[in-house]
Image (cartoon, rainbow, N blue to C red):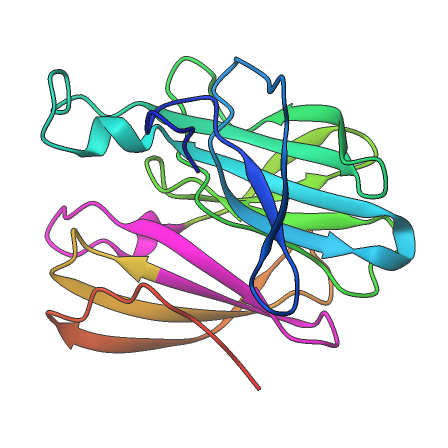
């Protein structure tokens, strides 16, 4: 997520099957808040997407560390060339959304993806070919006693019909939300699992 000094620009690193470091991109990376955190790949369409999230140095006990530098963008890559072909702004660039995660939708003919704004509570549908990000759901409906809801991790089933999202309430509680995404532009809420006090989910997987 961060560079050698813990700040920006960050890098995307490839490892082989034995976890040996192969290469990092880029030698000359973007300087406009390149802090990749989420990553998804579609080899069949030569497509990779990454989501810029936060400057990691600003999350530590350092000078200025009390001021988070959130990011709010999705990078579209030519996978084979390891080259960024487009940068898509998510939400209001004046108040970065905090795009922790991005997931491509399996079998989607338009090669779209989902991301979420941790800082402003929206679910976004990202069109990687048109270069757009549209808010399609607001997680504020799950707010409890005006506590800030933080959508963070996303997973999509292999069929591309269900989306799972973790919600954190300042690490004090958490939920997992499931959507029907047969129509990605109109996700339908199917169920919510409340994990209770002290949960703060920060890993999500499915079979």
Corner quadrant of residue 117? top left
Could you say which is closer to the camera, residue 146 or residue 206? 206
Q: Residue at x 19, y 55 (%)?
A: 169
Could you say which is closer to the camera, residue 126 or residue 103? 103
Q: Residue at x 72, y 54 (%)?
A: 41
What is the total number of numbered labels drawn onto the structure image? 0
Q: Residue at x 60, y 69 (%)?
A: 18
User: Which residue is farthest bottom?
Assistant: 207
Can residue 90 be found in the magenta stretch? no
Give how far across and how far down residue 13 sits, in percent: 58, 44
In the rendered view, does 36 fall on the left or right side of 160? Answer: left
Give how far across and how far down residue 99 sits, in percent: 46, 39
Q: Residue at x 73, y 45 (%)?
A: 48
Query: What is the magenta range?
Result: 139-166
Which quadrant does the C terminus fall into? bottom right
Please tell me whether residue 56 is drawn above or below residue 205 in the rendered image. above
In the rendered view, does 163 fall on the left or right side of 116? Answer: right
Please tell me whether residue 154 is drawn above or below residue 137 in the rendered image. below
In the rendered view, does 168 fall on the left or right side of 74? Answer: left
Which quadrant does the N terminus fall into? top left
Corner quadrant of residue 121? top left
Give how far across and how far down residue 190 sits, in percent: 50, 75
Could you say which is closer to the camera, residue 165 or residue 8? 8
Give how far across and how far down residue 36 sits, in percent: 51, 37
Please tell me whether residue 62 is drawn above or below residue 119 in the rendered image. above
Can residue 165 be found in the magenta stretch? yes
Could you say which is closer to the camera, residue 41 or residue 114? 41
């Amino acid at each position: 997520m961060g560079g050698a000094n813990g700040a920006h620009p960050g890098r995307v690193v490839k490892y082989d099957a034995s976890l040996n470091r192969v290469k990092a991109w880029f030698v000359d990376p973007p300087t406009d808040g390149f802090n990749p955190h989420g990553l998804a790949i579609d080899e069949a369409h030569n497509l990779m997407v990454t989501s810029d999230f936060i400057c990691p140095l600003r999350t530590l006990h350092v000078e200025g560390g009390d001021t988070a530098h959130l990011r709010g963008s999705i990078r579209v890559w030519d996978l084979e060339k390891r080259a960024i072909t487009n940068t898509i702004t998510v939400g209001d660039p004046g108040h970065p959304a905090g795009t922790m995660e991005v997931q491509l939708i399996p079998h989607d003919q338009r090669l779209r993806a989902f991301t979420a704004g941790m800082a402003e509570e929206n679910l976004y549908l990202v069109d990687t070919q048109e270069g757009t990000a549209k808010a399609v759901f607001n997680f504020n409906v799950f707010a409890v006693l005006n506590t800030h809801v933080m959508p963070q991790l996303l997973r999509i089933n292999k069929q591309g019909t269900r989306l799972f999202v973790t919600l954190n309430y300042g690490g004090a509680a958490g939920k997992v939300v499931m959507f029907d995404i047969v129509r990605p532009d109109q996700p339908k809420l199917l169920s919510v699992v409340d994990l209770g006090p002290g949960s703060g989910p920060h890993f999500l997987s499915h079979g």
